[in-house]
Image (cartoon, rainbow, N blue to C red):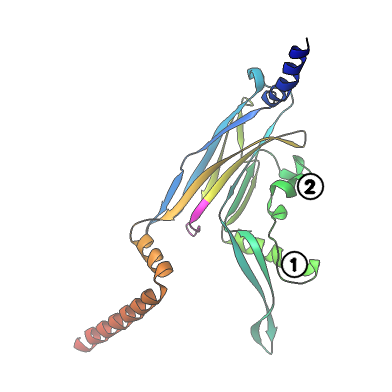
Amino acid sequence: MRLRAILLLLCAPLAMGQAKPVLVPDVSQRDIEIIYSFTGAELLLFGAILYPGGRVPDDRADIVVVVKGPVQSVLMREKQKVAGIWVNAESARFRSAPSFYAIASSRPIGELVDERTRAIYELGLDSLQLSPITSGSPEQQQRFAAGLVDLRKRTGLFVEEPGSVEITDDVLYRANIDIPARVPVGRFTAETFLIRDGRVLAAAVRDIEIRKSGFERFVAAAADQWSVTYGLAAVALSLALGWAAGALFRRF
């Protein structure tokens, strides 16, 4: 009896773990190559929800997908008009601003989870943890953060699409995320969250690699690894093209 009781105690956490649903996500492209004719891409995120015993609960569950690019340090400057001239005034630097952020959900995020949960999982543009590293009042930091979000929204690098995740038979889901032409390169993550009754029940991540290919990759690598040589070569090429254009015009 004692041995049986011990076995039941040891197996209890496993049984509880099996009682939770599991996400099986995937993406249409694990590698996106940027070439000279790249005009953007459409990324399909899809997958299935595996419920314990294959039984779908009566309470409806929601899906949220988030695609993030590599984080980067960003300096935001505010311009002011002084004597009719626009000059740089105050500035703020953020340590961990995502270079790309897109979120899609089956319903608006505000209807799914509370503000605390949104902040923990960074669900929504208003919940991004940008980590300001410059001194300033909270109001000033909030103003610069809002400016950064608005700027990247206008360039297509920050996207929020509530209600765009389709769920079929409460088991299968899919969502489309547009990748703009000016997307930065690096390792991206596609995160999927299963939410019910205001709680995140399951989460899963898939990696996506976006990189330059062909001649663009060679130019980017040269500029990064041999910056001085690259600069001198660019200046020499500009001078040579200018001289050739001048000689051609003088002839005709």
Label 1 sits on a secondary structure element that is helix
Quadrant where the C terminus lies? bottom left
Residue depicted at 49% across the width and 60% down the height: 182
Left or right: 212 in relation to 191: left
Q: Could you say which is closer to the camera, residue 102 or residue 108?
A: 102
Image quarter of the N terminus: top right
**Which residue is depicted at the point 25% across and 82% down?**
244
* Circle 2: residue type: Arg
Pinpoint residue 94: horizontal percent, then vertical percent.
66, 65
Q: CA distance from mark 1 to mark 2?
A: 20 Å
**Marking on residue 50:** none
Residue 4 image point, x, y percent: 74, 12
Magenta includes 31? Answer: no
Q: Amino acid at mark 1?
A: Gln
Mark 1 sits on what residue? 141
Our reading of the magenta stretch's main secondary structure is loop
Identify the magenta region: 181-187
Does residue 148 sit above or below 204 in this rendering? below
Q: Compared with residue 156, is residue 235 higher up or lower down, i.e. above or below?
A: below
For label 1, the crowd category at 10 Å Cα-Cα, with few meaning under 14, some 14 to 19 and many 20 or more, is many
Using the rendered view, name the quadrant where residue 251 is placed: bottom left
Q: Earlier in the sequence, mark 1 or mark 2?
A: 2
Identify the residue under disc 2.
Answer: 116
* Residue lying furthest left: 251
The spot of residue 214 in percent (x, y) is 33, 57
Point out residue 217 in the picture as x, y percentages from the top left corner: 38, 60
**Residue 248 falls left or right of residue 47:** left
Residue closest to the eye, 155 or 27: 27
Q: Quadrant of residue 156?
A: bottom right
